[in-house]
Amino acid sequence: MKRKNSYPIKKSERDWKAQLSEEEYRILREKGTELPFTGKYNDHYQKGTYFCKGCGEALYRSESKFDSKCGWPSYDCAIKGSLEEIPDNSLGIIRTEIVCSKCGGHQGHVFNDGPTSTGLRYCVNSASISFKKSRIKS
Ligand SMILES: [Zn+2]
Protein backbone atom coordinates (compact mmCIF):
# COMPACT_ATOMS: atom_id res chain seq x y z
CA MET A 1 0.00 0.00 0.00
CA LYS A 2 1.18 3.49 -0.73
CA ARG A 3 1.91 5.55 2.31
CA LYS A 4 0.82 9.13 2.10
CA ASN A 5 3.63 11.56 2.43
CA SER A 6 2.20 14.36 4.49
CA TYR A 7 3.11 13.50 8.06
CA PRO A 8 4.66 16.29 10.13
CA ILE A 9 7.66 14.13 10.98
CA LYS A 10 9.58 13.09 7.88
CA LYS A 11 12.75 11.05 7.89
CA SER A 12 14.67 9.20 5.26
CA GLU A 13 14.57 5.42 5.30
CA ARG A 14 18.23 5.55 6.32
CA ASP A 15 17.45 7.70 9.35
CA TRP A 16 14.59 5.44 10.40
CA LYS A 17 16.86 2.42 10.11
CA ALA A 18 19.48 4.13 12.26
CA GLN A 19 16.93 5.01 14.93
CA LEU A 20 14.90 1.80 15.10
CA SER A 21 15.81 -1.82 15.71
CA GLU A 22 15.35 -4.19 12.79
CA GLU A 23 12.10 -5.50 14.24
CA GLU A 24 10.78 -2.00 14.98
CA TYR A 25 11.63 -0.87 11.45
CA ARG A 26 9.91 -3.89 9.94
CA ILE A 27 6.72 -3.16 11.89
CA LEU A 28 6.59 0.64 12.01
CA ARG A 29 7.85 1.41 8.53
CA GLU A 30 6.98 -1.76 6.58
CA LYS A 31 3.65 -2.54 8.27
CA GLY A 32 4.87 -5.77 9.77
CA THR A 33 3.28 -7.66 12.64
CA GLU A 34 5.04 -9.18 15.62
CA LEU A 35 4.21 -12.73 16.65
CA PRO A 36 1.33 -12.87 19.14
CA PHE A 37 2.17 -13.19 22.85
CA THR A 38 5.77 -12.11 22.23
CA GLY A 39 5.59 -8.34 22.63
CA LYS A 40 6.78 -6.68 25.82
CA TYR A 41 3.51 -4.80 26.37
CA ASN A 42 1.05 -7.62 25.70
CA ASP A 43 0.80 -8.48 29.38
CA HIS A 44 1.66 -5.08 30.82
CA TYR A 45 -0.76 -3.18 33.05
CA GLN A 46 1.16 -0.44 34.80
CA LYS A 47 -0.41 2.98 35.02
CA GLY A 48 0.96 5.48 32.55
CA THR A 49 1.06 6.44 28.91
CA TYR A 50 2.09 4.65 25.73
CA PHE A 51 4.00 6.62 23.11
CA CYS A 52 4.81 6.09 19.44
CA LYS A 53 8.15 4.32 19.16
CA GLY A 54 8.89 6.24 15.99
CA CYS A 55 8.36 9.81 17.17
CA GLY A 56 7.33 9.87 20.83
CA GLU A 57 3.77 11.07 20.27
CA ALA A 58 1.40 10.05 23.11
CA LEU A 59 -1.03 7.50 21.68
CA TYR A 60 -2.76 5.47 24.41
CA ARG A 61 -3.46 5.71 28.12
CA SER A 62 -3.12 2.74 30.44
CA GLU A 63 -6.78 3.19 31.45
CA SER A 64 -7.76 2.22 27.90
CA LYS A 65 -5.78 -1.01 27.91
CA PHE A 66 -7.59 -4.29 28.36
CA ASP A 67 -6.80 -7.98 28.06
CA SER A 68 -8.11 -8.98 24.67
CA LYS A 69 -6.44 -12.43 24.86
CA CYS A 70 -5.44 -11.94 21.23
CA GLY A 71 -1.73 -11.74 22.00
CA TRP A 72 -1.14 -8.05 21.28
CA PRO A 73 -1.55 -4.96 23.42
CA SER A 74 -5.15 -3.83 23.06
CA TYR A 75 -6.85 -0.56 23.87
CA ASP A 76 -10.49 0.47 23.69
CA CYS A 77 -9.61 3.99 22.61
CA ALA A 78 -6.64 6.09 21.56
CA ILE A 79 -5.72 9.62 22.55
CA LYS A 80 -7.82 11.93 20.41
CA GLY A 81 -6.21 12.92 17.13
CA SER A 82 -3.13 10.79 17.69
CA LEU A 83 -3.91 8.11 15.11
CA GLU A 84 -4.93 8.07 11.48
CA GLU A 85 -7.17 5.29 10.19
CA ILE A 86 -6.49 3.85 6.75
CA PRO A 87 -8.61 1.23 4.95
CA ASP A 88 -6.54 -1.92 4.45
CA ASN A 89 -7.61 -4.75 2.14
CA SER A 90 -4.21 -6.41 2.09
CA LEU A 91 -5.26 -9.85 3.34
CA GLY A 92 -8.35 -10.01 1.17
CA ILE A 93 -10.41 -8.87 4.12
CA ILE A 94 -11.35 -5.33 4.95
CA ARG A 95 -9.53 -4.03 7.98
CA THR A 96 -8.68 -0.60 9.27
CA GLU A 97 -5.00 0.11 9.72
CA ILE A 98 -3.94 2.57 12.39
CA VAL A 99 -0.85 4.72 11.98
CA CYS A 100 0.66 7.48 14.09
CA SER A 101 -0.67 10.80 12.81
CA LYS A 102 2.69 12.49 13.46
CA CYS A 103 5.11 10.15 11.71
CA GLY A 104 2.90 7.65 9.86
CA GLY A 105 4.39 4.75 11.81
CA HIS A 106 2.31 1.57 11.57
CA GLN A 107 0.65 0.63 14.87
CA GLY A 108 -1.68 -2.20 14.01
CA HIS A 109 -5.39 -2.34 13.26
CA VAL A 110 -8.61 -1.20 14.91
CA PHE A 111 -11.55 -3.60 15.02
CA ASN A 112 -15.14 -2.97 16.02
CA ASP A 113 -15.49 -6.04 18.21
CA GLY A 114 -14.27 -4.47 21.45
CA PRO A 115 -15.84 -5.70 24.71
CA THR A 116 -16.08 -2.30 26.42
CA SER A 117 -18.46 0.61 25.93
CA THR A 118 -16.47 2.06 23.04
CA GLY A 119 -16.96 -1.16 21.04
CA LEU A 120 -13.46 -0.73 19.63
CA ARG A 121 -10.33 -2.82 19.90
CA TYR A 122 -7.09 -1.11 18.96
CA CYS A 123 -4.77 -4.05 18.35
CA VAL A 124 -1.21 -2.74 18.53
CA ASN A 125 2.31 -4.12 18.12
CA SER A 126 4.48 -3.75 21.22
CA ALA A 127 7.36 -2.85 18.92
CA SER A 128 5.41 0.22 17.78
CA ILE A 129 5.15 1.76 21.23
CA SER A 130 7.09 2.71 24.33
CA PHE A 131 5.75 3.20 27.84
CA LYS A 132 6.28 5.78 30.57
CA LYS A 133 4.81 5.80 34.04
CA SER A 134 3.59 9.33 33.63
CA ARG A 135 0.24 10.75 32.86
CA ILE A 136 -0.23 13.29 30.14
CA LYS A 137 -2.91 15.94 30.25
CA SER A 138 -5.80 15.47 27.88
ZN1 LIG B 1 4.84 8.48 15.51
Image (cartoon, rainbow, N blue to C red):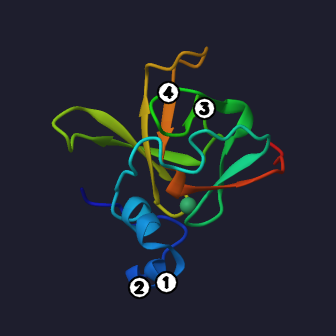
Residue on which disc 4 sits: 69
Identify residue for label 3: 77
Q: Which residue is mark 1?
A: 18
Label 3: element kind: loop
Which residue is label 2 attached to?
14
Q: Secondary structure at mark 2?
A: helix
Q: Residue 73's spot in the image, x, y percent?
A: 55, 39
Report helix, strand or loop for mark 1.
helix
How packed mark 3 is, by other alpha carbons closer than 10 Å (few <14, some 14-19, many 20 or more), is many
Q: CA distance from mark 1 to mark 3?
A: 31 Å
Q: CA distance from mark 2 to mark 4?
A: 36 Å
Q: Amino acid at mark 3?
A: Cys
Q: As shown in the figure, which amino acid type bears the numbered disc 2?
A: Arg
Q: Residue at x 49, y 74 (%)?
A: 10
Viewer-proximal residue among 58 and 22? 22
Q: Are marks 2 and 1 in contact (CB under 8 Å)?
A: yes
Q: Residues within 10 Å of mark 1 (few under 14, many from 20)?
A: few
